[in-house]
Image: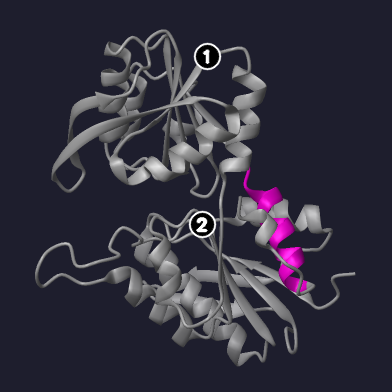
Amino acid sequence: MLERLRLFSGNSNRTIAEKICEKLEISLGKAGVCEFSDGETRVEIRENVRGMDVFVIQSTCSPVNTNLMELLIMIDALKRASADRITAVIPYYGYARQDRKAEPRTPITAKLVADLLTTAGASRILAVDLHAGQIQGFFNIPVDNLYASPLLLEYIRAMYSDCDVSVVSPDTGGVVRARAFANKIGASLAIVDKRREGPNRSEVMNLIGSVNGKLAIILDDMIDTAGTMVQAAEAIKKGGAIDVVACCTHPVLSGPAMDRITSSVLKEVIVTDTVPLQDNAKSSDKIKVLSISGLLSEAIKRIYYNESVSSLFN
């Protein structure tokens, strides 16, 4: 029995939280999260959490700063309500791409967010597909970084088992991820060599490896404006691929992303629900959403019982 477990949610991931509660056979914690008339975030925990093992689910996606403040204030409220342990469950970790000083006089905002979460009172972090592995080292508390690849693999095996597949990394930074994915389905590997000209802008330069006559699966951790993904798909199609499918964990899909995807050569874009979709993405025939709730519910259960979660890191 999960008698001492309480699960709360901010506004960004309430649907996932409800699915997790259903799987764990518990009720979602009672909390009010809203805004005062001046825009300040107001949080009220409406049940007793003294001595409880509490999990707060909140992706820091758009609106990023609002969702981040909701998470920080909820953690602070739970700490002051005498919760025993507070785990911040962050399916999508905002500011993760600002993980280093790319240019002089720029911040490392991913580290700042880690410091804020720790100072607010988080006892541990549960995340999904962090953009950069070193973010785990930004914390002085335990961090569990889960991977959505088992969900994506299961779907690919079910839908494309009869196809000759090539897994494509859209840049050199994702080669390790793409190679591991390719090995698990017995596929070949290709790489798109690109040169980035500025933030949210990229130019595809060359395709390394053969995709001729194959189903190409582009694998990335997130799709933001979809510029990289769409340009990569075009280069792959020119390389002779029969069809091009995209897989990613985090469907950020900001700005012109959906317009680009709709008019692209992509046959399908497979994503998870770490980031809630906008209406235009929900109605798109090209977007296939897989739920991360099963993976998170299993991790939460194991953390609650102080069991190993390492088997979920594959």
Dominant secondary structure of the magenta stretch?
Answer: helix
Identify the secondary structure beneath mark 1. Answer: loop
Query: Horizontal and vertical percent for residue 234?
Result: 27, 19
- Give the quadrant of residue 150: top right
Q: Give the residue drawn at x 28%, y 30%.
A: 192
Tell me the kind of residue under disc 1.
Asp
Magenta part of the protein: which range? Answer: 291-304
Q: Kindly tell me whether residue 290 is visible in this rendering.
A: no
Question: Residue 50: horizontal and vertical position, in percent?
Answer: 73, 89
Residue at (39% x, 81% y) in the render? 115
Q: Relative to 25, is 145 on the left or the right?
A: left
Residue 287, placed above or below residue 298: above
Question: Where does the image place residue 125, in percent across and percent down from the top left?
Answer: 55, 71
- Whichever of callouts 2 and 1 sits on the residue coming sooner in the sequence is 2
Q: Which residue is mark 2?
A: 12
The dot on residue 164 is 1
For label 1, the crowd category at 10 Å Cα-Cα, with few meaning under 14, some 14 to 19 and many 20 or more, is some
Q: CA distance from mark 2 to mark 1?
A: 38 Å
**Mark 2 or 1, closer to the camera:** 1
Q: Residue 224 occupies which quadrant of the picture? A: top left
